[in-house]
């Protein structure tokens, strides 16, 4: 059975979608069959990193939750799309890989429909488990909404691996305690932490790692620096693929390898 | 005339409207039941013998006896946290997650928003 990897942060702006897209891409580049689901239905965004916009977007998770299509019809093959249409430096390396994106709708009316009427959580879970089986996925990465809501809690409850992203910021530290407590109470088998946006030259990384691990009693898989190059990339490309030797990318690849090493 | 499968699906759908468990409720379950519920969420449905096998794989300290497992399954089914189709050894169980509630904002607000989005 493949592994479900949820990427979560208690607060917004931690780089969750960017991290999820890069982790999934690194796994796909290593020959794994990978799915990426955007369960951030209220504020979807990960599709941008894979070069998908509203015009190219076909069926979405919203269509599936409204009973308008099967979960398989939502699958957007990144490997095929990149091979056919995409000349972006980093992303083009994904041509021919087994990587599928399951996007949420960026249509305002469809987002408001979900917010207004809710949805069947059983159907969401059935969809996730079905695509794992039908596509024979090795890994399903779930990009979640920050904070805690139904989608997030479900993704935590069904995860084999939970990666919690935090910044070295007191608000993030407090919020992460909540997430870690919930993950533990739901028996998530593998919990990894990742610090993102650490101001360069401010921290001794060994000290920071020791502090974070002592506070949350979990493994810190990587510390990734705050960097203008990432901001300048502006979600146009998958940064760890276009700049593999960059310190941020090296940190990200370390986290990817930590996930793939989990048996 | 609907077949057996269709009738079962209708039966499941009817039961699913009756409530359900949230992920936070899972956190309050005894460890052995939580482990089984997590497994059922991944498997989507399990029959009684698979449930017994899964319970046998739970560490001894957390393991439930057959009688306690049967009692727990009955209780969870009565609360509509599990959906049971069939009886005793032939039963099939599915988890029943509570529907995500819609907004409690007044309808007028949503209608206005829809009108604006339609323009």
Image (cartoon, coloured by chain):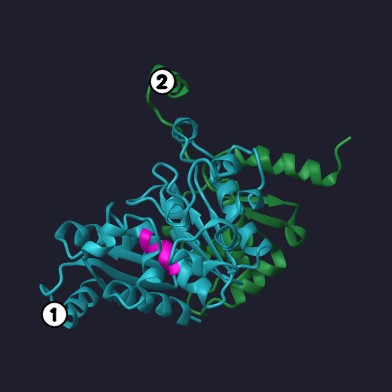
Chain colours: A cyan, B green
On the same chain, marks 1 and 2? The answer is: no
Q: Main secondary structure of the magenta part?
A: helix
> How many marks on residues?
2
Q: Eyeballing the image, is A69 above or below A245? A: above
Nearest-to-viewer mark from 1 and 2: 2
Most extreme residue toward the left is A202
Residue B94, given in percent of the width and then of the height, sits at 64, 54
- The numbered disc on residue A110 is none
The image quadrant that residue A137 belongs to is bottom right
Task: Quarter of the image for the N terminus of chain B: give it.
Answer: top right
Is residue A119 rendered to the left or right of residue A172?
right
Instruction: Choose between A207 and B86: the one closer to the eye.
Output: A207
Residue at 48%, 40% (x, y): give it.
B100
Residue at 60%, 53% (x, y): give it.
A75
Instruction: Choose between A211 and B16: the one closer to the eye.
Output: A211
Element assignment for label 2: helix
Is residue A198 rendered to the left or right of residue A66?
left
Residue B98, given in percent of the width and then of the height, sits at 51, 44
Is residue B103 among the parts visible in the rendering?
Answer: yes
Is residue A8 among the parts visible in the rendering?
Answer: no
**Which segment is the magenta one?**
A18-23
Q: Check disc 1 and report the residue beneath it.
A: A204
Q: Check disc 2 and report the residue beneath it.
A: B116
């Amino acid at each position: 059975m493949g592994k479900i990897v949820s990427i979560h942060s208690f607060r917004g702006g931690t780089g969750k979608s960017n991290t999820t897209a890069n982790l999934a891409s690194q796994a796909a580049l290593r020959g794994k069959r990978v799915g990426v689901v955007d369960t951030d239905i209220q504020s979807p965004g990960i599709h941008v990193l894979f070069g998908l916009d509203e015009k190219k977007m076909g069926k979405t998770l919203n269509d599936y939750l409204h009973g308008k299509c099967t979960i398989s019809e939502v699958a957007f093959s990144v490997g095929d799309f990149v091979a056919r249409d995409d000349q972006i430096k980093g992303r083009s390396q994904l041509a021919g890989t087994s990587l599928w994106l399951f996007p949420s709708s960026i249509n305002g009316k469809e987002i408001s429909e979900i917010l207004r009427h809710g949805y069947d959580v059983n159907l969401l879970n059935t969809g996730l488990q079905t695509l794992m089986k039908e596509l024979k996925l090795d890994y399903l990465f779930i990009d979640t909404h920050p904070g805690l809501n139904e989608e997030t809690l479900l993704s935590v409850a069904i995860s084999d691996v939970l990666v919690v992203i935090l910044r070295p910021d007191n608000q993030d530290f407090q919020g992460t305690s909540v997430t870690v407590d919930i993950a533990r109470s739901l028996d998530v088998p593998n919990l990894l932490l990742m610090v993102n946006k650490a101001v360069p030259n401010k921290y001794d990384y060994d000290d920071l790692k020791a502090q974070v691990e002592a506070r949350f009693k979990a493994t810190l898989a990587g510390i990734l620096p705050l960097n203008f190059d990432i901001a300048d990339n502006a979600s146009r490309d998958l940064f760890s693929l276009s700049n593999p030797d960059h310190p941020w990318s090296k940190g990200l690849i370390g986290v990817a390898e930590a996930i793939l090493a989990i048996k | 005339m609907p077949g057996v499968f269709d009738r079962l699906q209708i039966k499941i759908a009817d039961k699913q409207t009756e409530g359900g468990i949230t992920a936070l409720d899972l956190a309050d379950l005894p460890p052995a039941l939580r482990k089984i519920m997590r497994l059922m969420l991944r498997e989507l449905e399990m029959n009684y013998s698979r449930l017994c096998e899964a319970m046998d794989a739970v560490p001894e300290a957390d393991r439930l006896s057959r009688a306690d497992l049967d009692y727990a399954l009955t209780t969870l089914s009565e609360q509509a946290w599990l959906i049971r189709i069939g009886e005793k050894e032939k039963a099939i169980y599915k988890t029943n997650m509570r529907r995500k509630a819609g907004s409690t904002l007044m309808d007028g607000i949503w209608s206005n928003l829809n009108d604006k989005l339609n323009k």
